[in-house]
Structure formats: C-alpha cells, structure tokens
Amino acid sequence: MNSSDLPGANVTPVCYSIKSPPFKYHPTVASIYYSSIFSTLGLSSNLIAFIVLLKSFRRTHNRSRSSFLIFLGGLVVTDFMGLLVTGLIVVSYYVTHFNWRELDPNCHFCNFMGMSMVFYGLCPLLLGAAMATERFIGINLPFARSASAPKRRTVSMVLMVWMTAGCIALLPLTGIGSYHIQIPGSWCFFNISSEGNDLAFSLLFSLVGLICITASFLLNTVSVVTLIKVCCGQDSAQRRRDHEVEMMVQLILIMTIASVCWCPLLVFIAQTVLSGGPLQIKYLVLWIRFATWNQILDPWVYILFRRAVFKRIFPSFDWSRGSIMSLYPSFRETVRRYTRPSLLSNEGSNQTAEMTKSSVTSPPTAKPPPSST
C-alpha cells in the first residue's frame, strides 16, 4: 500500500487550505524595513514608559492614582509583549525567508501567531474600556467603590481582561473560526470570510473591539463633564481634583489613539464579511499596520502628558497656586455659570456625607453630673 493511499495522507492543513506559500504579492507596506522600524520604536517606547510608570507608582500615595497606574502598567506590558512576539516572527521571516510548510507542517506555529495577533489586539481595547469604567465609578460614584484592597481589585481586573482576550483567541482552535497564513507569508491571522464559523468569529472580533471603543467614549464623556463641573468650583475642590484631571487627560488620549488606529480595521472586517465581497489584501495589510501604531503611540501618552513634564517645559508657571483649570479663567467662569445648579447639589450632598461621617465617628460627649442642691 502506498503512503498516498493512507487516510489523511494528502489532507492539507487548515492554515494552508485557502492560501499557501510562497506568495508573489508583496505590498510595499509589508517589508523588513517597516517591520524592523515599527518593532524597534514600539519596544523602546514601551520600555521607557514602563520605567516612568514604575517610578510614579513608587512615589504615589493616592489610591485612585495607584489603581490607574496599575492599569497603565498592564497596558504597557501587553503592548510590549505583543510587539516582541509578533515582531520577532515577522522580522525573522524577512531575514531568513523560511518556508512555513516545512517549518510548521501541522499549523501549530501559525495558530500561535494568529492567537497572539487576536490576544494582543483585543487587550488594549478591553483595558481601555476597563480603565474608563474604573474612572467613571471613581469620579461619579465614589461611595460605590470599596476602599479596601484597591490594588488587589485592580490587578484582578487586569487579569480578567487578559483571560477574556485569551478565551476569544482560543475560539478558532475549537472550530469557531480558523487561523490561516496571510499574504505576503510573514504572518497568520483569522480567516476573514462570510461563510460559516469564520463569519461568526470575524463579527465577534470586530464587535468586541467596536463595543469597547464606544463604551470608553460614553463613560469618558460623562466623567469629563463631571470633572469640569467640579474643577470650576471652589479652589480647595480644584486642588483635590488635579490628579483626576491628569488621569482623565491621559485616558482620553489613549481612547482617541485606539479609536483612530483600530476603527479602520474593525470596520473593514465587519464590512467585508457582511457584504460577502472578496478580501482586499492591500487594505488588510494597511489597516493592520495602522493598528500597530496604537502600541507605539500609547506609551508616549504616559511619558509626555504628566504634570512633571509640563513643569519642566513651562517652569515660569506657578503650578502650586491652583488647579489646571486656572490656566483658562474665562472658560472656567463660563462653565461655572452653566453648571452652578449641579455644583450646588454636589456640594450639598458632599456636606451631608461629611456631616453623616462626623456624626458616626465622633465620640459621644459625656453629660455633666447633676448638681447637688
């Protein structure tokens, strides 16, 4: 009996069933120069950001700030590892020009890279939504957040985000979707198709990303409006809220970068599978490169947009005299006029809470003994 007569002897592995290397199409944006520059710039940026965050975490004594720094640290670690894993594979391909069919006949390596692309792609979007939720609760519902073990709770949320992204990345291995080699042969990704389980996974990936971006936008908008109302109040309230303003500025920039970098790819995937048209390879490679910029630009938000940096850039400004909102007195007076009813209600609730807290914590005063007659 010949080996070709054995059952399954000539079965093509799943990752090579649609496209099989070598490929003749090589887009300009997919080259060793782009891959090397992107990987080097992204890895160095995230490494610098991690050092900056580590120093800030050691100096901070604010609970909400420390929780926010843990989220940022998780985002930096995720971006760094994503660039390291995927960048090594892509750059190695362009340097050695290895044959995927010989190196990975059973698609294990291709599945690993496809899972890495999905996992490290969804993590920044999920973490952005988690940070927006945490800031929304901290700013708008401060009494609903437990003050016990905030760092442990934040670490648990980061781990939960990683677990969620990991479970989604594992779905193609269970039959919901499939990972395939992609043109020009340097990377693997899930099959973007309008048929069967590939359609389901493509829509799942796209919808999860778009929902995270939308939720981040809505929650951050409400938090910013609340902060503007508070920052236009009394000076004491402004000084207490300065660290909140700094965190919201960083979070809004992270959300903006994620939206600009990821929305084209997410919309492209959803549009391709819903329309049923052929996959445009040049646009897929272009939007993948576009999404990679998210991992490169994110760390510069933490590096540059800090009060310590602004103090060095504008040393003549008296940073100790008031809030960030004091930079714009006319804007502050305008917002104060339109938000005064909300401020009065917020101040009244704060005073009521403080009176309640003082009545609970203050020791009862001893009654004087009755005077003898």
Image (cartoon, rainbow, N blue to C red):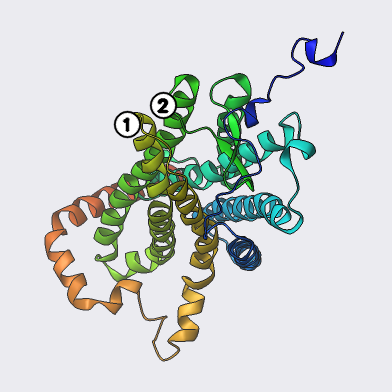
- The answer to whether the residue labelled 2 contacts the one labelled 1, judged by CB atoms less than 8 Å apart, is yes
Classed neighbour count for the residue bearing mark 1: other residues with Cα under 10 Å, few (<14), some (14–19), many (≥20): few
Give the mark nearest the N terminus, 2 or 1.
2
- Residue 59 lies, in percent from the top left, at 62, 67
Identity, as a three-letter code, of the amino acid under mark 2: Ser
Looking at the picture, tell me which residue is in the foreground, 116 or 238: 116
Residue picked out by circle 2? 194
Question: Residue drawn at (64%, 53%), measured in percent from left and top?
Answer: 77
- Identify the image quadrant of the N terminus: top right
- Residue 248 lies, in percent from the top left, at 39, 59
Identity, as a three-letter code, of the amino acid under mark 1: Ser
Question: Residue drawn at (37%, 46%), measured in percent from left and top?
Answer: 216
Question: Residue drawn at (57%, 52%), measured in percent from left and top?
Answer: 75
Mark 1 lies on a secondary structure that is helix
Residue picked out by circle 1? 275
Looking at the picture, tell me which residue is in the foreground, 129 or 338: 129
The answer to whether one can see residue 152 in this image is no
